Image (cartoon, helix red, strand yellow):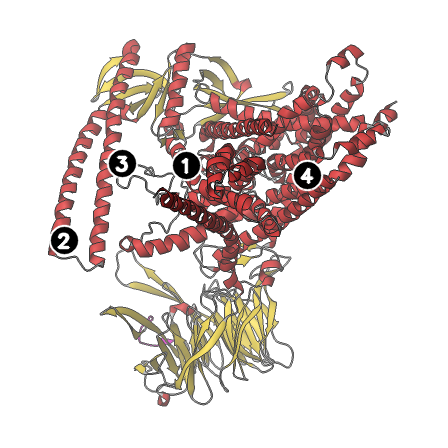
Amino acid sequence: MQKSSSSYYQKWRLLKDNIARYGVVAGGMGVIAAVVMIFFYLLYVVFPLFLPATAESASQYAIPEQAQGKTLLLDMEEQNQVAARFTDSGHIVFFNVETGKTLLDQAVAIPTGSQIISFAQATPLNAGAVIYGLSNGTALIVKHDYKVTYANNVKVITPSIAYPMGEKPLVLDDGGLALDEITAQISDDSTTVVAKTAQHIYLSSFQKEQALFADEATLTRTDAVLNLPSAGVQEMLIDKDGSHLYLLSNQGRLDFYDIGDKSTPVLKQAQNIVEAGQAVTSLAFLNGDLSLMVGDSSGLVSQWSMVRDDSNRSMMQKIRAFKVSDKAVVALKSEQRRKGFLALDAAGDLGIYHSTSEKQLIKEHVADGLSAVALSPRANAALMQSGDGKIHFWTIENEHPEVSLKSLWQKVWYESYPKPDYIWQSSASNNDFEPKYSLIPLVFGTLKAAFYAMLVAMPLALMGAIYTAYFMNPMMRQYVKPVIELMGALPTVILGFLAGLWLAPFIEEHLSGFFALFMVVPTVVMAFAYCWQFMPKTVLEKIPDGSDAMLLVPVILLAGILAFSISTPLEIALFHGSLRDWFRNSLGIGYDQRNALVVGVAMGFAVIPTIFSIAEDAIFSVPKHLTVGSLALGATPWQTLSKVVLLTASPGIFSAVMIGFGRAVGETMIVLMSTGNTPVMDLSVFQGMRTLAANIAVEMPESEVDSTHYRVLFLTALVLFAFTFIFNTLAEVVRQRLREKYSSL
Amino acid sequence: MIKEWFKSGLPWVWLNAAAVSVCLIMIVSVLGLIAVRGASHFWPAQVVQFAYQDDGGQVQTLIGEHVDSSVTPAVMARANGIKMADNEDTLIQYLVKTGNRDVTGSDFRWIQERHVKSQQTPDDIMVIERREWGNFYGRLTAVKESGKVIASGANANAIALQKLDVTLGLFKDIAHIEKKEIGAVNYDLERLRLKQKKLQLEQQWDAKAQQEVAAEKAAYDKVYNAYQAQLQGLYQKARQDSLLVKTDSGSEVEISLAKVVRLYQPNQMGVFAKIGHYGSKVVEFLTEDPREANTEGGIFPAIFGTVLMVMMMAVMVTPFGVIAAVYLREYAKQGFVTRLIRIAVNNLAGVPSIVYGVFGLGFFVYILGGNIDQLFFPEAAPAPVFGTPGLLWASITLALLTLPVVIVSTEEGLSRIPKSIREGSLALGATKLETLWLTVLPMASPAMMTGLILAVARAAGEVAPLMLVGVVKMAPTLPLDGNFPFLHLDRKFMHLGFHIYDVGFQSPNVEAARPLVYATSLLLVVVILGLNLSAILIRNHLREKYRALEG
């Protein structure tokens, strides 16, 4: 009985032991797996940035209501359910995007006796308006609308058309000449129409003014005739503000007018935009209407943008080009929310590109003889009409076109910038803004901050470590080491706060005194040391060996006071006023209150304990027999140190510096609080910077989940992670090697 | 001679010594700066009355605390466009805290010493600490009750203090009703709303349920209205009395006692009165809620939030850290793999804390939290419950961040335990688990303790990751309160470190908030250095113990 219970107990013990074994192994592995997961999770978020875009054919069908005429324009609404086909007979055919079934076929109110001569989609594109130029010198503006309703929890989209300027056509040419080219800019309170007849180019603008208590708005009309021969004008475009007009002539010349004042258009520039011998085959604004995309007969699409030149004039300039195809470009369509565009070529290929990242995202063959194309507002579907009378519906998966290795790491010529540059500017209030995701300014800022921090920390920490490990008397070392290590425990938010609110104004006020410190303190210390050897023996004997550091504390304090008190008179004598003004006026170096100098001192302070502690350990654990041997051979302590100890400990010192550098790179709060956080690339010690870590802290809370911005921020976190990982691993491997070496010595 | 001296290498030794001295000076002066500025904030300063005459202006009276001075050489002052007489070498300026922001538009004013005709510290100047608009400096002329003067002249002061006591008592009641009672009712109403929505989602929103919910709601509304009525009465009572005060420019201002927190006449105070005042300010700082966008009052919610977050983190990090260390030291076969793991763990300690924040936000908040919301709180949608930064995610993120600290420290403790002890236990027939549980772990417990303390110290001072995973500048409710389930893991919380960042850098009136930031810094530094020191002491004690054991 007793035996069985005891064996039962034995079994229970062994079982417990086994459970614990597996539990601990599982737990231990789990913890380590969790830690590895951080890396993989970051990678998982970043990865979609570099996934290629895809496009695939979803369906194709015969052109709906082909009898109503040739297609002038295809368009699609937000939900990718209803599309519209505008025909040359003045019909608008709304049809189901997937099946091509006609939903509504409506004729536009074209007055009898006149025909449609010209047609254009009005800017901005998302307003959904088109304009018809008629044979009798009048024009008609039509808007297509889509109403979303929910009937029995099913989404129903009902298309309709409206006439924002009235059903009666606007008279542009009193003589009744046909309008053979037309364009318009339409918004809630103003409309600008430019039309061309065989003789003139007319510009008419309508301002809607709502009187305070009136229901009806009054329209004010301004007319002007452009002082330009109308012959040869092939295409016309107005930007969304209605302030710039572009006329394309058939020799490939672009005339750019400022029409800010509608009654007096001013010609700003005339420029050839294609190579000689080539013709412009399509023209479109990029989203935001700041750049023109020009497709030509050689298959080249070039981007022309307003660039401010040296004399501060805005001029059209070609900022980049895409080789789309060997054949002519047939159609260009811009995305409505990003800086991407779609191009069709004569070979029947569909290409999707992004201007900032200069990337070809998609290139697929669709069908021969492509003519019209519609790109959905979310840029995730396209409709194309092919030569064999079919409409092709393609879906597009293209989440992050803005990011390419080039847009992250190389100079990019952004719209309205005078030249290619590295810029980080991730968001703005308007939605046609071009996000600028260059990581270079952030990496530069990070390295700059770390560099100045190391400049302060390295000499202090390493020299301090040498002295503490090798010369200081053990009693003192016992206290000094923990005190300096305790420095490392100070929360960085406090260091940042002191740096930003105390040190920064202090340095600003006492800049010269601060620089004087670097000269006065070493000089005074040397002078004191020199004089010290002439002290009477009785005094020298009372001071224990290796407590020089304590002796020097009052000396350095006095030297500091001296430095600050002589600095002001010196400043006045040498620089005729404050040093700061002198820097600005004589050297042209601006002074920012929260600058690299402040960061250097504050972050240096934070890094000193890390470097000090590891370096001190390395030096202290150099085997004693090496130093004793060297001293016995007659070397002075300094010779022993510099020739034996430091050489032996150098890998340890190296790893200390690496780890310190890693810490400086990743530090967030100090830089966040003691720099201006502007992502500038300026080496000057008097300018601020923005680091990777601070950038994450500033922008992460506001970024939308899974957006490109969010993923790019994760990428910067990954870069930080990789950076510190490499440095720390290097340091760790070197240290382990060193430990083995010591144990073998 | 000098050449020889240089050759001996001694100067370099001295320079190295100087580096140590500089480090020591730096740390002592930083600590000293925080201590002096932080601790002096609560001491009642003398209020000075200046007779001040600007260039060609009238002599005016200025009342305020002298906060700071600056000395500028004449050359630079001239460059800044200040007219200086030929015989003046320097321009001395005082920064005076004049208060009365509602009257003058600013709290602080720079004045030039040469324009000060006289300064004195009259006894009758009164400092009024207010709930809004900062301090008021002036002279008390009369006390009013419901618009009628009840005391003026010499005895106004005593009456004002008496009345203030009564009003403050009323405000205590008001705060209790507003925060505790009405807070609880509001919480219950919100739960009722969620219950209703849940029933609707589950298609159980029938007549019976509707009736029940309506009845419950009516009951809560009744309680709520009763409290509202009570509050109204209290407010009316509190707003009865007011003070008539004369500002430095001579105009008379009426201040309702309901807006006053504290009244005192610093120039009259003796040392003991000042110590008493200091004590009451310190108590206020530690136990009360902040006022005026965190720039005045106390920091209790921040202390509470920090402590709670750190405690939750400690609960999570200790078992995992210890298990990982036990695995590494006791179970895993030492070799390439363990070496790799050690490198990884050491590495993690060096990963920037903001990266942990990014991970916490992406993984814990959006992925884990988002899924928890979908599964368990569909009724709260579209408002997130756990799918938004909060206490739970903050403490888990920091647990991950401090894991290496605990692992390394525990491992070190385990490695110091002599092999003989384990072998002895195993030889006596104990299983590995028993050996571990009954001998090794108890011996290593001080090492774990050290690791835990270091982890807590690290977590208490960490701000960057918290900014992403749950800290806010102003949390309306504490994460721990009297409403079921008492501990609200989904709530956002306040944190001392973030408080420093926020008040020091994001507040509209940085100059006025600065002393409070120093005080908060001092508190944080004291806590963290205390924790670190105790960790060092435990470690040293432990080393001594093992040395004895080995010997």
Whether A461 is drawn above or below B194: the answer is above
CA distance for labels 2 and 3:
27 Å
**Circle on res. B311:** 1
**Residue A687 horizontal side relative to residue A375, left or right:** right
Quarter containing the C terminus of chain B: top right
Q: Look at the numbered disc 1 and give the secondary structure of its residue.
A: helix
Q: Is residue A691 magenta?
A: no
**Residue A745 horizontal side relative to residue B281, left or right:** right
Which residue in the structure is indicated by mark 3? Answer: B482
Task: State the extent of the magenta-drawn residues as a range.
Answer: A164-171
Pointers 2 and 1 within a single chain? yes
Residue nearest the observer in this picture, A691 or B125: A691
Pointers 2 and 4 within a single chain? no
- First in sequence, mark 3 or 1: give its number: 1
Chain letter of the residue carrying label 3: B
Q: Look at the numbered disc 3 and give the secondary structure of its residue.
A: loop
Q: Look at the numbered disc 4 and give the secondary structure of its residue.
A: helix
**Circle on res. A455:** 4
Residue B365 image point, x, y percent:
41, 51
Depth check, mark 2 against mark 4: the one in front is: 2
Circles 4 and 1 in contact, beta carbons < 8 Å: no
Residue nearest the observer in this picture, A604 or A188: A604
Circles 3 and 1 in contact, beta carbons < 8 Å: no
Which residue in the structure is indicated by mark 2? Answer: B209
Task: Locate residue A208: give its quadrant.
Answer: bottom left
Chain letter of the residue carrying label 4: A
